[in-house]
Image (cartoon, rainbow, N blue to C red):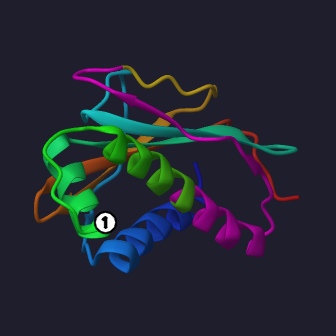
Amino acid sequence: MDINFINPFLSSLSNVLETMGGIKSDIGKPSIKKSNLSKGDVTGIIGMTGQNIKGSLAISFSQTVIIDIVEKMVGEKVIEIDDTVIDMVGELTNMTTGGAKNLLVEKGYDFDMATPVVVSGKEHEIVHKSEGQTILIPFNTQEGNFYIELCFNNSFAKK
Protein backbone atom coordinates (compact mmCIF):
# COMPACT_ATOMS: atom_id res chain seq x y z
CA MET A 1 0.00 0.00 0.00
CA ASP A 2 1.32 3.41 -0.97
CA ILE A 3 2.50 5.60 1.93
CA ASN A 4 1.02 8.60 0.09
CA PHE A 5 -2.38 6.94 0.50
CA ILE A 6 -1.82 6.04 4.19
CA ASN A 7 -0.43 9.35 5.44
CA PRO A 8 -3.66 11.37 5.01
CA PHE A 9 -5.44 8.99 7.41
CA LEU A 10 -2.67 9.35 9.99
CA SER A 11 -2.56 13.13 9.64
CA SER A 12 -6.33 13.38 9.83
CA LEU A 13 -6.56 11.31 13.02
CA SER A 14 -3.76 13.28 14.71
CA ASN A 15 -5.43 16.53 13.68
CA VAL A 16 -8.88 15.48 14.96
CA LEU A 17 -7.49 14.47 18.36
CA GLU A 18 -5.40 17.61 18.78
CA THR A 19 -8.06 20.02 17.51
CA MET A 20 -11.03 18.51 19.35
CA GLY A 21 -9.37 17.46 22.60
CA GLY A 22 -5.87 18.91 22.78
CA ILE A 23 -4.53 15.34 22.67
CA LYS A 24 -1.04 14.90 21.32
CA SER A 25 -0.12 11.55 19.82
CA ASP A 26 3.00 10.08 18.30
CA ILE A 27 2.77 7.71 15.36
CA GLY A 28 4.65 4.43 15.74
CA LYS A 29 6.16 2.02 13.26
CA PRO A 30 3.70 0.35 10.84
CA SER A 31 3.53 -3.43 10.58
CA ILE A 32 1.48 -6.04 8.77
CA LYS A 33 -1.34 -7.34 10.96
CA LYS A 34 -1.57 -11.12 10.93
CA SER A 35 -4.82 -11.80 12.84
CA ASN A 36 -8.36 -10.46 13.10
CA LEU A 37 -8.16 -9.88 16.86
CA SER A 38 -8.47 -6.29 17.98
CA LYS A 39 -5.66 -4.59 19.85
CA GLY A 40 -8.21 -2.61 21.90
CA ASP A 41 -11.47 -2.80 23.82
CA VAL A 42 -13.56 -0.72 21.41
CA THR A 43 -13.13 -0.27 17.64
CA GLY A 44 -14.67 1.97 15.02
CA ILE A 45 -14.74 0.46 11.53
CA ILE A 46 -15.65 2.21 8.28
CA GLY A 47 -15.75 0.91 4.73
CA MET A 48 -14.71 2.88 1.65
CA THR A 49 -15.44 2.16 -1.99
CA GLY A 50 -14.79 3.91 -5.25
CA GLN A 51 -14.29 3.07 -8.89
CA ASN A 52 -10.95 1.36 -8.19
CA ILE A 53 -10.88 1.49 -4.39
CA LYS A 54 -12.28 -0.97 -1.89
CA GLY A 55 -11.15 -1.09 1.69
CA SER A 56 -11.70 -0.14 5.27
CA LEU A 57 -10.24 1.65 8.23
CA ALA A 58 -10.46 0.60 11.87
CA ILE A 59 -9.40 2.52 14.97
CA SER A 60 -9.03 0.44 18.16
CA PHE A 61 -8.76 1.95 21.62
CA SER A 62 -8.07 0.45 25.02
CA GLN A 63 -10.61 1.46 27.66
CA THR A 64 -8.05 3.67 29.43
CA VAL A 65 -7.12 5.60 26.29
CA ILE A 66 -10.65 6.13 24.94
CA ILE A 67 -11.97 7.24 28.32
CA ASP A 68 -9.19 9.84 28.49
CA ILE A 69 -9.97 11.02 24.94
CA VAL A 70 -13.73 11.24 25.58
CA GLU A 71 -13.26 13.10 28.87
CA LYS A 72 -11.01 15.66 27.17
CA MET A 73 -13.34 16.06 24.19
CA VAL A 74 -16.67 16.33 26.03
CA GLY A 75 -15.47 17.68 29.36
CA GLU A 76 -17.33 15.10 31.44
CA LYS A 77 -16.16 12.28 33.71
CA VAL A 78 -16.46 8.84 32.09
CA ILE A 79 -16.12 5.59 34.05
CA GLU A 80 -16.61 2.84 31.48
CA ILE A 81 -17.29 2.17 27.81
CA ASP A 82 -20.86 3.45 27.58
CA ASP A 83 -23.08 4.98 24.89
CA THR A 84 -21.16 8.26 24.99
CA VAL A 85 -17.87 6.43 24.38
CA ILE A 86 -19.39 4.26 21.61
CA ASP A 87 -20.79 7.38 19.89
CA MET A 88 -17.42 9.16 20.18
CA VAL A 89 -15.53 6.21 18.66
CA GLY A 90 -17.93 6.24 15.71
CA GLU A 91 -17.54 9.99 15.34
CA LEU A 92 -13.73 9.83 15.55
CA THR A 93 -13.74 7.13 12.87
CA ASN A 94 -16.02 9.20 10.64
CA MET A 95 -14.08 12.47 11.13
CA THR A 96 -10.74 10.75 10.50
CA THR A 97 -11.94 9.15 7.27
CA GLY A 98 -13.67 12.34 6.11
CA GLY A 99 -10.54 14.39 6.72
CA ALA A 100 -8.40 11.87 4.88
CA LYS A 101 -10.88 11.78 2.00
CA ASN A 102 -10.59 15.56 1.62
CA LEU A 103 -6.80 15.28 1.44
CA LEU A 104 -6.92 12.35 -0.98
CA VAL A 105 -9.37 14.06 -3.36
CA GLU A 106 -6.71 16.74 -3.82
CA LYS A 107 -4.33 13.94 -4.92
CA GLY A 108 -6.82 12.54 -7.43
CA TYR A 109 -8.40 9.72 -5.39
CA ASP A 110 -12.15 9.47 -4.99
CA PHE A 111 -14.22 7.13 -2.83
CA ASP A 112 -17.45 6.98 -0.86
CA MET A 113 -17.59 6.29 2.86
CA ALA A 114 -20.01 3.97 4.63
CA THR A 115 -21.49 4.69 8.05
CA PRO A 116 -19.07 3.66 10.80
CA VAL A 117 -19.81 0.59 12.92
CA VAL A 118 -18.51 0.33 16.50
CA VAL A 119 -17.63 -3.00 18.10
CA SER A 120 -16.60 -3.41 21.73
CA GLY A 121 -15.49 -6.14 24.10
CA LYS A 122 -12.24 -7.86 24.96
CA GLU A 123 -10.55 -9.58 22.01
CA HIS A 124 -13.28 -8.74 19.49
CA GLU A 125 -12.59 -9.44 15.84
CA ILE A 126 -12.05 -6.87 13.12
CA VAL A 127 -12.88 -8.20 9.67
CA HIS A 128 -11.82 -6.05 6.74
CA LYS A 129 -13.75 -6.64 3.53
CA SER A 130 -10.80 -6.32 1.20
CA GLU A 131 -8.22 -8.70 -0.19
CA GLY A 132 -5.21 -6.50 0.59
CA GLN A 133 -2.88 -6.74 3.55
CA THR A 134 -3.89 -5.00 6.76
CA ILE A 135 -1.45 -2.32 7.86
CA LEU A 136 -1.38 -1.76 11.65
CA ILE A 137 -0.05 1.56 12.94
CA PRO A 138 0.25 2.33 16.66
CA PHE A 139 -0.37 5.78 18.08
CA ASN A 140 1.02 6.64 21.49
CA THR A 141 -0.65 9.09 23.88
CA GLN A 142 0.04 10.02 27.48
CA GLU A 143 -2.50 7.37 28.55
CA GLY A 144 -1.17 4.58 26.31
CA ASN A 145 -1.43 3.24 22.78
CA PHE A 146 -4.27 2.95 20.33
CA TYR A 147 -4.15 1.54 16.82
CA ILE A 148 -5.30 2.38 13.34
CA GLU A 149 -5.70 -0.36 10.72
CA LEU A 150 -5.96 0.18 6.98
CA CYS A 151 -6.82 -2.53 4.50
CA PHE A 152 -7.31 -1.80 0.79
CA ASN A 153 -7.33 -3.82 -2.38
CA ASN A 154 -4.10 -3.62 -4.26
CA SER A 155 -5.62 -2.23 -7.44
CA PHE A 156 -6.76 1.20 -6.24
CA ALA A 157 -5.92 4.04 -8.53
CA LYS A 158 -6.58 7.70 -9.01
CA LYS A 159 -9.75 8.72 -10.79
Q: Residues within 10 Å of mark 1 (few under 14, many from 20)?
A: few
Residue at the location (17% across, 39% down)? 80
Is residue 135 shown in magenta?
A: no
Q: Is residue 31 visible?
A: no
Residue at the location (39% across, 79% down)? 19
Q: Is residue 72 left or right of residue 10?
A: left
Q: Is residue 80 visible?
A: yes
Image location (x, y in percent) of residue 129 = 62, 25
How many circles with numbers are drawn on the protein? 1
Image location (x, y in percent) of residue 55 = 64, 38
Q: Is residue 59 left or right of residue 129?
A: left
Helix, strand or loop status at disc 1: helix
Q: Which residues are magenta?
A: 96-124
Is residue 114 shown in magenta?
A: yes
Q: Which residue is mark 1?
A: 74
Furthest toward the front, the residue is: 76
Looking at the image, residue 149 lies above or below residue 124: below
Q: Nearer the viewer, residue 83 or 60?
A: 83
Image location (x, y in percent) of residue 96 = 52, 60
Report which quarter residue 27 is drawn in.
Answer: bottom left
